[in-house]
Amino acid sequence: MSRLGILADRLRRRIERRRLILRAIRGRFALRAVTDRTARIGPGDILCFVTLRNERARLAFFLDYYRSLGVRHFLVVDNASTDGGGDCLREQPDVSLWWTDASYKAARFGMDWMNGLLRRHGRGHWCLTVDPDEFLVYPHMEDRPLPALTAWLSDIGRQSFPAMLLDLYPKGPIEDAVCPEGQDPFAIARWFDPANYSIHKNGHFGNLWIQGGPRSRVFFRDDPWNAPALNKIPLVRWSGRSAYASSTHMLLPRGLNRVYDEDGGERISGCLLHAKFLSGLADKSAEELDRRQHYADSREYRAYRDGLGCGTGLWCSQSREYRDWRQLEDLGLLSSGNWA
């Protein structure tokens, strides 16, 4: 690219970042505070930001999981849930809760709300932005909580941390994989694809784009280029210049997306274990197709509706049973880099 082209591309990103920040500021007005406990946030606290709808069955395990890793405060947007999950969240002393019945789609699939809360409450903090069915694993997590990881990242000048979304699934039919409320979903959905992933680089944002796994293999086998993206950058030291551009797949400024080494080495990375493939998926897909609030006219949920049936399963002869982060590192799905 010519020097003029590089400057023009940089200008486009700057304009886009400012547009995203303006949308984030406006997006906050769609939120009504239910319980605002953000005054309790301490200077060095790690924060978790979540948008959800009808996820009550996952909440107890989700909150306990991230508390055990060192998250000190949860900032949650409830998009008009009807399952009573908001009542549970309102009772938690480390949760601040906002409610909205505004359009998830019009808010860029909730990211305007997240960017708004991140900008208002996350600046200067390491912030984890995840869905209620995403569970971060990273090297040495058994004896190094998130504050140890983020302190080390800060020491080496890193401001963001990537994690590939790793779909876990049961060995039998998805509709038979019942996970009682509050239980560990990975006691039931313990299998994953060890390979079958493709990676390419996004030239404009500089991030890696990852696709594949069981969703590509089963639900998008005839259209793999439209399979869901698996690349995520969920953990970021937030600043007033930061903004998520597309879900947590990529950010601006562009440097936050440089979470990989192009010189033959490896940088530290994690995985987000994805607990989507459980018995409630068919009902969830039907609900989301009726709402039509998801990306590309709910293409992903349409694929689930068309692919789910009696006896539908994702397990195959190449599937592996999940053990721990070391197993994922051996398979090249995450890396400890030089964090010995």
Image: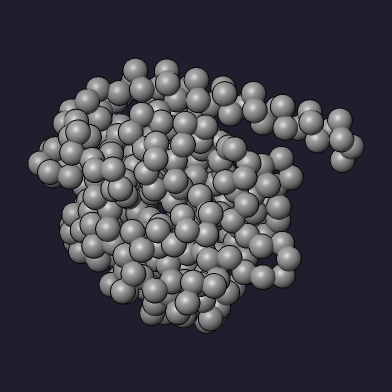
Residue at point 27%, 58% (across, down)? 70
Q: Which is nearer the eye, 119 or 215? A: 119
Numbered disc total: 0
Residue at point 19%, 33% (across, down)? 39
Residue at point 76%, 32% (across, down)? 9
> In x, y percent, where is residue 93?
12, 43
Q: Which is nearer the eye, 214 or 10? A: 10
Task: Tell me the quadrant of the picture where the N terminus can be found.
Answer: top right
Residue at point 29%, 62% (across, down)? 69
Which colouring convention does the figure follow? one colour
Question: Which residue lies most toward the front here?
Answer: 155
- In this view of the protein, can residue 312 be seen by the observer? no
Question: Which residue lies most toward the left here?
Answer: 91
> In x, y percent, where is residue 184?
25, 66
- Please indicate whether residue 68 sits to the left or right of residue 277 in the image: left
> In x, y percent, where is residue 76?
28, 38
* Depicted 226 relative to depicted 308: above or below: above
* Depicted 257 relative to depicted 333: above or below: above
- Please indicate whether residue 322 sits to the left or right of residue 207 in the image: left
- Please indicate whether residue 260 sits to the left or right of residue 155 in the image: right
- In this view of the protein, can residue 94 be seen by the observer? yes
* Depicted 314 relative to depicted 208: above or below: below
> In x, y percent, where is residue 49?
34, 42
Q: Quadrant of residue 292?
A: top left
- Please indicate whether residue 46 sits to the left or right of residue 196 in the image: left
Q: Which is nearer the eye, 290 or 240? A: 240
